Image (cartoon, helix red, strand yellow):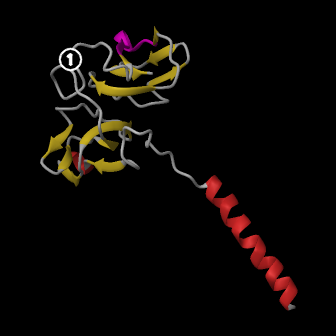
Amino acid sequence: MTHGKQNWLWGLLPVAVLALAGNAQAQRYDDGYYNDGPVRCESNKNRTAQCPFEGRARLVRQLSGSPCIEGDTWGQSRGGIWVTRGCRAEFVAERGRPSHGGGHGWGGNGGNRGGRGEIIGCDSNDNRMRRCNVSIRRDARMIRQRSNTACIEGQTWGWDRDGVWVNRGCRADFEVR
């Protein structure tokens, strides 16, 4: 190959790398309130697992069919997250998010938290689909699962601009923004 052709090929390399990088990006939770990237913590064979973690954890994606309920099958201890009884999930660390009310820093009043978002509860009773109508401008996030039935985004709960839906026994609190 001649020197001119080699230079031309090397010139295409950055373009190819950028094109591939655009297709391989993972979902990030860095919206100014959460640290970069989720941390996965898994309870295998129903055993308790400890995962190193700094900051206030928020469950962002449940991976297991077993329920991940804060204070029951997952929680925080000094320097980490613990999971048990088959809970497998991804967590992000909050930073600078104010806490109002009691409980686990999520505000026991069920209302607005400093203008960040409205907290709503939505329950699938008798395993039936239920829609909880609320205007959603940005997104909805599960902040606390209250059911023993797993709440898995896209399977047993989801959202659109008109509200949150739950199904198959999922009962949870959601922050809508």
The foreground one among 54 and 125 is: 54
Q: Give the range drawn in magenta.
A: 119-129
Seen from the viewer's position, the closer of residues 90 and 107 is 107
- Magenta stretch: residue 125 in it? yes
Q: Nearer the viewer, residue 118 or 127?
A: 118
Q: Position of residue 17 (x, y in %)?
A: 66, 66
Q: Is mark 1 on a helix, strand or loop?
A: loop
Q: Would residue 10 be seen by someone viewing this image from the given angle? A: yes
Q: Residue at x 72, y 65 (%)?
A: 16
Dot 1 amino acid type: Gly
Of residues 159 and 119, the one nearer the viewer is 119
What residue sits right under mark 1 in the picture? 108
**Image quadrant in which the C terminus is located:** top left
Residue at screen point 40% across, 49% down: 36
Which residue lies at the image location 47% right of the left edge and 10% below the top edge? 134
Q: Which residue is drawn at 25% across and 25% down?
A: 106
Above/below status of 98 relative to 49: above
Name which quarter of the figure residue 85 lies in: top left
Q: Is residue 15 magenta?
A: no
Locate residue 79 relative to residue 151 in the image: left or right: left
Q: Residue furthest bottom?
A: 2
**Residue 158's x, y, as percent?**
48, 24
Q: Position of residue 169 (x, y in %)?
A: 36, 18
Considering every residue shown, the one lying at the far top of the view is 133
